[in-house]
Image (cartoon, rainbow, N blue to C red):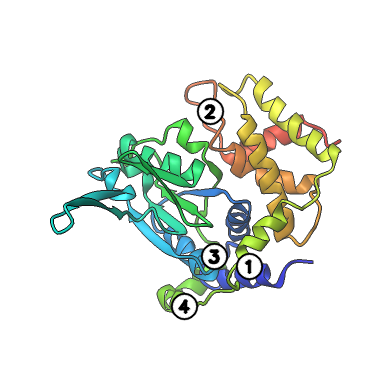
Amino acid sequence: MISPSIQNVIEQAGKVILGKEHQIRLALACLLARGHLLIEDLPGVGKTTLSHVLARLLGLQFHRIQFTSDMLPADIIGVSVYERDSATFKFHPGPIFSQLILADEVNRATPKTQSALLEAMEENQVTAEGETRRLPEPFFVIATQNPSNQVGTFPLPESQLDRFLLRIELGYPDHAAERALLQGADRRDIMGSLSSCLAPGELIELQAKVRTVHAAAPLLDYIQALVEQSRQSPDYTNGLSPRAALALLAGARAWALVQGRDKVLPEDVQAILPGIAGHRLRPAHDGVRKSSADIAAGLIAAVPIP
């Protein structure tokens, strides 16, 4: 049975992000799996709003970083400033020292600035001027990016893409959801009325519960077969890495928990696979571009369920 707290988060988020329950569940599963989330889509479809809503409903300290082409790594991590009274340098933390970071339009910054997120996303720490500093717990990055064919974007390198457990797309709302959006209250007013659905420490408990969701040996065989198929397929330049396999398992466990189950089914793996594989697999042939759904469908069709 689904946790009342999780159900409440989904219902409250659905009041702001209309007609996107599947994407809300995916985003929530990503955070419960202790992963970072990449949202790629056109401007104006609700990427930033979803990030704000999740931070508010999960009771997380939130900071938005608007990435621009002239941003420097110090603008994210922080900088040491000389204080005349004490004759010492004092470190002033940057916005990265928050529980949930919205890296808005991350691909508008240069690769040098994008790389400032790598250590934070992988190690939950940052190193500045020779000193390592821990980040808050829990710590999440939700990054939004515009399609790479838009003017003024810098593609994220594969090493950084691999740090995101999931990549999702919101897409346009359907007709009924868009009509409700046009006729309803202002989204900012609704978002302002939201409060945390989780008690202090409950998110940490749910994350720990994800790791206890049972994955049977045949289920692990299925995950390994999907990963192996991606490596053998001539359609891609390289297959899914061991980190991607771990992400697939963690994501499937979290998806099962969001669905109210205590064990992972093949359907859970299939539901999470598009978000895992879509940004990690590169077509082997120039000019061939597949959607995340098509990539996952090809792998699922090629691998029988044990």
**Residue 175 marker:** 3
Dot in front, 2 or 1: 1
| Residue at mark 4 | 190
The residues bearing labels 4 and 3 have C-alpha atoms spaced at a distance of 21 Å
Is residue 260 shown above or below 275? Answer: below
| Element carrying mark 3 | helix
Residue 138 higher or lower than 229, as above or below? below
Which mark is on residue 282? 2
Q: In the depicted view, which residue is nearer to us: 201 or 50?
A: 201
What residue sits 73% from the left and 44% below the top? 269
- Residue 53 in picture, x, y percent from top left: 49, 67
Residue at (52, 36) in percent of width and height:
162
Instruction: Please tell me in which quadrant of the rendered image residue 152 appears.
Output: top left
In the picture, the disc for residue 73 is none
Which of the numbered marks, if any, corresponds to residue 202? 1
Amino acid beneath label 2: Arg
Query: Mark 1 is on which residue type?
Result: Glu
Could you give the CA–CA distance between mark 1 and mark 4, rounded to whole angstroms?
24 Å
User: Left of 113 or right of it: where is 101?
Assistant: right
Number of dots carrying numbers: 4
